[in-house]
Structures are given as structure tokens and as C-alpha cells.
Image: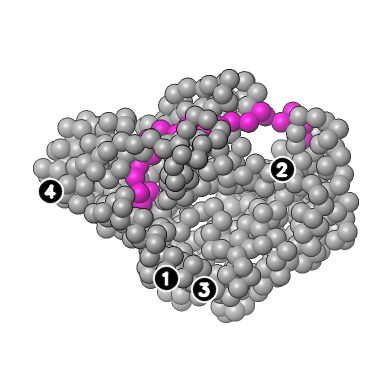
Amino acid sequence: MDEKIIEELKNIVGEEDVSTDPLEIYVHSRDSAPFQGFADVIVRPESTEEVSQILKLANDYKIPVYPRGSGTSICGGPIPVLGGIVLAMYKMNRIIEFDRENLMVTVEPGVICDDLNEFLAPYGYFFPPDPGSSNAATIGGMVGHNAGGMLALKYGTTKDWIQWLEVVLPGGKVIRTGSNTLKSVSDYDLTKLFCASEGTLGVVTKIGMRVAPKPKYYRTVLFYFDDLRKAGNAIVNVRSSGVVPAALEIIDRISMKTAGEYTGMDLPEAEAMLIVQTDGLVEEQVQREIEICFEAAKKAEPIEWMMAETEEERNKAWAARKAAYPALVRTSPATTCMEDMSVPVPKIPDALVKLQKIPERVNNLVSIGIFGHAGDGNLHPTFQYDEREPEQREAFFKALDIMYREIALPMGGTVTGEHGIGLIRAKYLIDEYGAEVVELMKGIKKVFDPNNIMNPDKGKPWGVIEV
């Protein structure tokens, strides 16, 4: 990059917030997907005005810009594949206002999800989307990928809680979408268009979000099964019971074993564990709902079950679930890649069984652990292999083809429920939607970003990238 541009960036944000240090460039070159790209410069803005000036400069010189939060993405989303600017948003981390009467909070994109909920807790409220990386995930990143998480079954995903956005467009213009009101149909709902846009349309600089009363009562029950299909049947039974639980999660044998070792918990020997949780403000209602879920799950013949009687027991159950991914990472030979397929809930039993057979179809050059938000059909098959070994890397991408083209899509599912397209799923877009829809998405991209500087070759506008 021309030194003149580096100097102009320093004039905008200050010398201390512009870095060309090779170590910092390297740190910002990956997320957890098996790809890498190196920026020319890392820039850390602290205000909307600074973002606006940066994007105007980048647009004038046609320099790629890659917005980045904490880097917890697992699809290759923030990787600077064409060099240019990594726009590191983590210094814009203020909670600006909590409007308690309107049940809305305004934040900057660098606010961490758990920090927001810690702020809201004394007031008796919370922000329901709960990704597994909530202790590191930024709200801006959650908007960019429409993060869901373990409570999405009852409470919905990030887009369901966003009221309005302040966004800087590629030419530097600042716009506001949405409304402070609960109902508004006066636009094309640009707010939801930016949700899950993966940084390809603009940079979100302020977020107005609804919050919910924090539940006072919880009931949690754990079921253990000697057969993965039985666990899948239990999921279908619970979802057909008339109750919408707050959470309905699955952990298979491999993930459960590693999570138990990682957390020091003594978990039973089983092929799968289900966690079912109800919550609410009325204790009798919460109790009745867990009883209905309990009877529904029992019809699938679990070998064991346990009701979490105390908050400590409930927290231990969720600690095991949240440990599933980091535990697998710890035991991986080199690479752990968590995938994100979703299928209609009635297809869950068949999907689980077919996923379990993928390693033998690629000569056992990869292994797989399965966990996820089974209540809404969103599974996270997590592959372990050594990306430094060409044969294993090839087997991994063959496993992805099997998973998406032979399992998820034929079942009426989708290639990503909440993690985004990024790099890793781009080639499956046409399989899912067809060329006409992908062309429409490219047209939308061109309206917002005619010079294609925002996270180029990434996410939903593309669909032709081979990686």
C-alpha cells in the first residue's frame, strides 16, 4: 500500500491506531476457518466520523476493507483475502444508552455480548441471543452474521432484536435504518438486510436493540441415549409437544467425552446427551412446560435422565455444552472446523445418523463431533483433521460436499443457520438458491457498494468462489 495512504489513515485515527506491524497483520489474518489472508494495514477507529473518513478514502482509492470484531467467526468472514484494510472495530465498545421505558439499549459494535448482559442484569433485563462465543463475540459481529445461539429456539436470532442501525456506506455516507417503534413498515426493512450481510454492504457503527425481562425461573433436564437416532426422535417429540422450550441442545458421544475431560465433569457413557430447558417469570408455568417436555422426550427411550435441581447443577450442564467446541479444539491434531448446517426438525434423526457416517466415506482422514441447537434444526458438525496434510485437507473439503450437497440441501435444509457464508460455504450458494437468486444478491451488493471494496469475494453476493 502506498505510504501516502498510510499517512492519510494516521491523520484520520491517530498514529497509535494504524499498524503495519507484521505480527499484528498475522494476528488479523485468520479466524478459525482453514484460510488465511494478509492485510496491508490494521486500522482501529473510535467513532462514526472516523469510519466515514476511512471508507471515503478506501472508496476513492478502491482499497478493500474488511470489518472485524473479535475474530470469533468460523467461516472465513473477516479474512483479508485481497490485502487492503482490516477495520478492527473493537475500540468502538461503548454502551451509549439504556432506555428502560422503551426497553431498548443503544451500543457501539465493539461491545461484547456477555458484557452487555452483565450491564443489563441489575436492571432485570437481558439481550437473548446467546452464541457459544458470547464471552468474546461483539454485537457488531453478531449483527453481521445474524448470530443465534442456544436460546434462539424460543427467543429468535439477533435480527429479531435489532430496531435500528447506524451504518456507514462505502462512499462515507452515514445512514440510519429502522425505527425506535416496535412496528414500522415504512421502508424495505434495510435493518434486516444489513443483519447477516457479513460486512459486504457497509459498516455498522451504532445499534439500537430491544431487550427482554430476564427470566426468574428455570427448569433444566438432561437425557442420555444409547443411540443417536433415538436422541433425534426425542428432539422431534419435544418440538411436537406444544411447548417451545427456551433451549433444546444435543451433544454426541465424542463431543460429550471431550467436554467432560475439558471441564472435569463426570458425564455418563452414552451416544448422545440432550439438554432441555424452560424458563419464564411464572414458576408454575415453567414447571408445567418442563414436565410436558420430559414426558415427550421419555417416549424416545433414554437410558438415563437427570433433573438439574439447583442453579449449580444447571450451570454445570451448560458448561458442558459450551465446552463442546473448545474441548474438541484442544484434542485436535491441528485443525478443528465447526460447521453450521440446518435441516427441518423432522429430518434431524436421519441427518444425525448420516453425519456420523461421513468419516468412513473419506477413509477416516477426518473425525467428527456433533453438537448444536437441535431444537431449531441447527447442527454444528465439527471436523478434526490436520490442514497441513494435503490428503487430510482434501478429505475435509470432500466431507463438506457430502454434508451440504448430499445431506443438508436434499433434506430441504440450508448450508448455514447462523455462522454465515464467508469463504467456506460460498460455492454452495448456487446449489441452495440457484443462479437467478445469487444474481439478485449481486445486484443488491452493487447498489450499496459499486466499487466492491466491502469484504470483497465474501459472503452472500458471490457463490462462485472455489477455495
**Mark seen at residue 246:** 2
Dominant SS type (magenta): strand
- For image coordinates 53% across by 59% down, the residue present is 416
Q: Residue furthest front?
A: 186
Three-letter code for the amino acid on which mark 1 is drawn: Ala
- Is residue 411 toward the left or the right of residue 97 in the image? right
Label 4 to label 3: alpha-carbon separation: 41 Å
Q: Which is nearer the N-term, disc 4 or disc 1?
A: 4
- For image coordinates 49% across by 67% down, the residue present is 433
Residue 50 coordinates in the image, percent (x, y) = 26, 33
Q: Which residue is disc 3 drawn over?
A: 401
Q: How is the image coloured?
A: one colour
Q: Which residues are magenta?
A: 199-218
Label 3 to label 2: alpha-carbon separation: 32 Å
Q: Which residue is disc 1 drawn over?
A: 435
Q: Which residue is disc 4 drawn over?
A: 2
Residue 296 coordinates in the image, percent (x, y) = 85, 54
Q: Which element is circle 1 on? A: helix
